[in-house]
Amino acid sequence: MSLQVLKNARRHPARDVAIQSISCIEAGDREGWLSLWDEDGLIEDPVGKSPLDPDGKGHRGMAAIKRFFDRVIAPSDLRFTIRQSFAAGDECANVGTITTRTKDGRVTRTELVMVYRVNSNGNLVSLRAFWEFDGTAQSVF
């Protein structure tokens, strides 16, 4: 786990949630990760149309967020390396790499920008991940 850039950066509510989110994902902590979300939260990962989101409208609401975890996060071992983090307003954008190892041993590295937005209660209301599906993780899904 490489969250040192985030941990060394100035404290910010969205950055704090990003650290918690990444830690839960790497630990496979489904309930911990789900507890970070607002009931009407939205995941766009990746942003736009992809095989993970054919309509390109994202995954909205707790039922969809649970399905996203079960379908996309749980089947693989995910490790994050964050190189840069920029916080402003109620959002934090992190630049980094996710290394995905599937149960059958395939490994993919995805370069991306992840944007986390929180509400006034500190709950995650959106996670938008900008990465290019073709040529990156297509072989994994």
Image: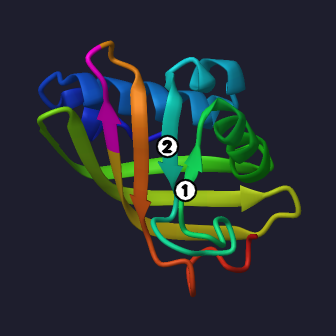
Residue 141 sits in quarter: bottom right
Examine the structure image and report whether residue 96 is included in the region drawn in magenta.
no
Q: How is the image coloured?
A: rainbow
Magenta region, residue range: 116-120
Can you say whether 121 is above or below 93 in the image?
above
Q: Secondary structure at mark 2?
A: strand
Give how far across and how far down residue 78 sits, in percent.
62, 49
Give how far across and how far down residue 88 sits, in percent.
11, 39
**Which residue bears the numbered disc 1?**
58
- Number of marks in the rendered image: 2
Q: Amino acid at mark 2?
A: Leu
Looking at the image, the residue that sits furthest to the top is: 121
| Mark earlier in primary sequence (1, 2) | 2
Inter-mark Cα distance, 1 to 2:
6 Å
Query: Residue at the location (48% across, 31% down)?
Result: 21
**Which residue bears the numbered disc 2?**
42
Label 1–label 2 contact, CB within 8 A: yes
Q: Amino acid at mark 1?
A: Gly
Can you say whether 35 is above or below 7 in the image?
above
Using the image as rendered, state which of residue 14 and residue 107 is in the foreground: 14
Using the image as rendered, state which of residue 141 and residue 118 is in the foreground: 118
Q: Which mark is residue 8?
A: none
